[in-house]
Image (spheres, grey):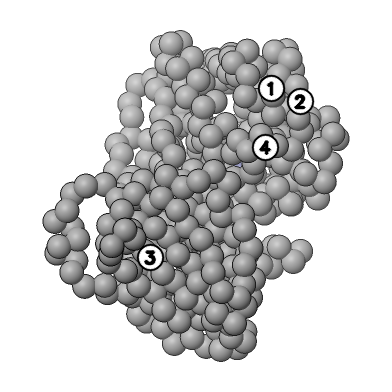
Amino acid sequence: MRREHGLRNIWRICAFLLTLMVGLGEAGQVFADSKPMIAKDARLAGDRERTRFIADLSKKVEVHAFALGDPYRVIIDVPDVSFQMPDGIGKEQRGLVTAYRFGLFAPGKSRIVLDIGGPFLIDKAFVLDPSDNQPARLVIDLVPTDAATFTAKLAESRAKTAASVADIRPPEPQVQPSRGKPVVVLDPGHGGVDPGTRGESGITEKEVVLTFAKILKAKLDAVGRYEIFLTREDDTFLPLRERVAFAQAKAAGLFLSIHADSVPKHPDLARGATLYTLSEQASDDEAKELAAKENFSDAIAGVELQDESDEVVANILLDLARRETQNRSVVFARSMVGELHEGRAGLHSKAMKSAGFRVLKAPDVPSVLLELGFLSNADDEKRLTSDAWQNSTADAIVAAIDTYFAKRLARIPY
Ligand SMILES: [Zn+2]
């Protein structure tokens, strides 16, 4: 319940956005230099009274830093950066900062996200020129405050934020509906600044699902009966609503969102693939928790969620067209369960579940979310990263897609 409440609050509280536009000057000179920018290292300094985040950059750039609440975060937007950071960086906890991460946010835009343990203020944000043997340095200074002051500051700067939020949003995909062959949209989850879950070996969900989606696309392309699109083809973050919009713009006949789960508390028990469809009421508590976790992707990346509401989602769920689409989603999910079972992909003991996944809410596109397995389970992690498993599982999904469309095109009633 708490998490659901928290998610609702994201819609509201994130609308109160504290923006600190940091004009760093010399922008002309900065952008005249076309060499790609490299971020080589980052570190934390100070304590709870004043925490400093420092990132070493190959040159001076213009940055845009702002705060978000629920959960507390600092978002730092920079132009396209090649992150060549040491392995394992970002897990350290110091002062007010509990962790940080970074990645491509949208084409040409990168983002650093700092997780903050409590209410705070951005006291300073600037970039130092390179000097002597020192690289250019991005510096963010944070100081603690109380929750009321934090909220008041967010409200105060609300007006200022509208323009900047619009500015940092990735562009809507400009795509044309396709004609002819049925369109299948594959959606590798997470990406860029949002790594998703992580396995023992350090491999991230965003890597596992992109690799798998590419293998599946190649197999479906080879079949020749479908037009296949990936929502992302590289390590770029994509907000959930844009994944949905992408499938709608392509007039997709099927949308398959691909993920990998993790339950570190039960590494041995939680294993195998699970298929999820959309429902208002979650099929069980685990499905509910998972939907909350997957829906959190936008918040992790610091995306604003102010143009939709639970009410809209609820109305869509009641819509008749939605129900028809929903029936088709369930038919497809069942077909997947059958084929994955046949293909010995390794199914979860309860292989079909449902919950309120935001990425599945296109009212006109049958949509299913596939959790390939659990990165918290050592056997699953091995399977998910092995060529043999990836190939046989992708074959099983191709068979399920064939079955689904064969029935659809023959107008066989479900
Ligand atoms: Zn995921």
Considering the numbered disc 1 on the image, is that residue within a helix, a strand or a loop? helix
Which amino acid, mark 4?
Answer: Gly
Task: Kindly report the distance in space between the C-alpha atoms of the residues bearing marks 2 and 1.
Answer: 6 Å
Place of residue 61 in the rendered image (x, y in percent of width and height, measured from the top left) = 27, 62
- Tags 3 and 1 touching, CB below 8 Å: no
**Where residue 381 sits in the image (x, y, percent)?**
69, 29
Determine whether the residue tagged by mark 2 lies in a helix, strand or loop: helix
Question: Which residue: 17% across, 53% down?
Answer: 33
- Say which mark, if any, is on residue 221: none
The numbered disc on residue 383 is 1
**Residue placed under numbered mark 3 in the picture:** 138
Q: What amino acid does circle 3 point to? A: Leu
In contact (CB < 8 Å): disc 2 and disc 3:
no
Query: Between disc 2 and disc 4, whose residue precedes?
Result: 4
Q: Is residue 79 visible?
A: no
For the residues marked 3 and 4, what is the alpha-carbon distance in whole angstroms? 31 Å
Residue wearing tag 4: 199
- In this rendering, which labeled residue sits more in front, label 2 or label 3? 3
Report the amino acid beneath label 1: Arg
Q: Nearer the viewer, residue 308 or 265?
A: 265
Ligand 1 located in image quadrant:
top right
